Amino acid sequence: MPVEYLWLFPLGLLIGAFGTLIGAGGGFILVPILLLLYPKEPAELVTAISLAVVFFNALSGSFAYARMKRVDYKAGIFFSIATIPGAIIGALSTAYIPRRIFDLIFGVLMIIAAIILWLSAEDKHSTSPNGAPIKSKTDPRLTERHLVDAEGTRYDYAFDLRLGIVISVFVGFISSLLGVGGGFIHVPALAHLLNFPVHIATATSHFVLAVMALTGTLVHVATGAFIHGVRRTALLAIGVLIGAQAGAWMSNRVGGKSIIRALAVALAFVGIRLILSEY
């Protein structure tokens, strides 16, 4: 294995930890790094490597969040199924986008997402200050959830399942098209549009990302785009499997507002860097 590949392991550790902490899978960090380091590689190879790494990250993080009892499995299963058609179409579409256009689209999207997240960041908790559950208004269109995590924290919330399914189809397409995992869209959508508590949104998003990323990766394997990225993916995957456990552990010690704003700063940084690299 080439010596220049060895730095991919520590990179995987960082991506796994931060990606799991914010529920984004880490692809939004990995893709721009790969684009900058491998300027001659086709976009479909970069996205194939990233999606495979996102899968291992999301899988490891999901196990950690499952132990914390923060995954909303009922919603997660519906959302996961909804991402599959979008993920297939997105993975097949990447090959038709010129590399320079791909880089610019990715950079602009990162900056827009960062601005929206920073302006909308707020702490959302599951209970009132005295520990009593927050009561939601009765609405037949809303699906109610009442979860208690491993630490005994109660989460009461209600959301529109149909809207969540529509959002998940879109997330599946964008995620596979750009190879970014989609958590940078899914987590804020769950938190702000569907009223999920941030920690539940982060954990459930990771569960959904595992299914979506596996779907996109299998499409790239079937088309042959993944064949030249196996060794790089292996080193990154080992790193994210370990780092994801650390990220899940840190999630207990970081507030919801801090999670969202950390994601916003990271998105802005990689977006600007990627756009500047084209000039």
Image (cartoon, helix red, strand yellow):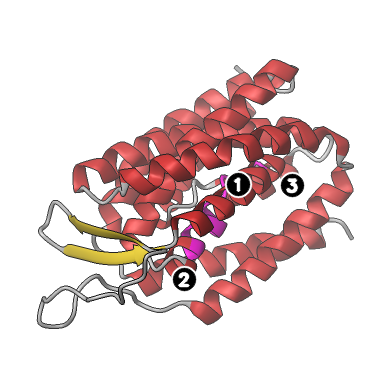
Q: Position of residue 35 (x, y in %)?
A: 74, 44
Residue 219 falls left or right of residue 200: right
The residue sitting at 13% across, 51% down in the picture is 150
Q: Is residue 130 above or below residue 38?
A: below
Which badge, 2 or 3, comes first in the chain's sequence?
A: 3
Write the residue at 31% across / 42% down.
Answer: 245
Dominant SS in magenta? helix
Quadrant of the rendered image containing residue 275: bottom right
Image coords of residue 244 (percent x, y)? 37, 42
Residue under label 1: 169
Instruction: Report the amino acid beneath label 3.
Output: Leu
Q: Secondary structure at mark 3?
A: helix
Determine whether, in the image, residue 179 is placed left or right of residue 136: right
Badge 1 element: helix
Q: Quadrant of the N terminus?
A: top right
Secondary structure of the residue carrying tag 2 is helix
Q: Earlier in the sequence, mark 1 or mark 2?
A: 1
Query: In the figure, is residue 165 to the left or right of 175?
Result: left
x and y percentages locating residue 192 in the rendered image: 46, 71
Magenta span: 179-189
Q: Which residue is mark 2?
A: 192
Q: Nearer the viewer, mark 2 or mark 3?
A: 2
Amino acid type shown at disc 2 = His
Residue 53 position within the rendered picture, expressed as x and y whole percent measured from the top left? 53, 34
Q: Residue at x 72, y 65 (%)?
A: 272
- Name the residue carrying label 3: 36
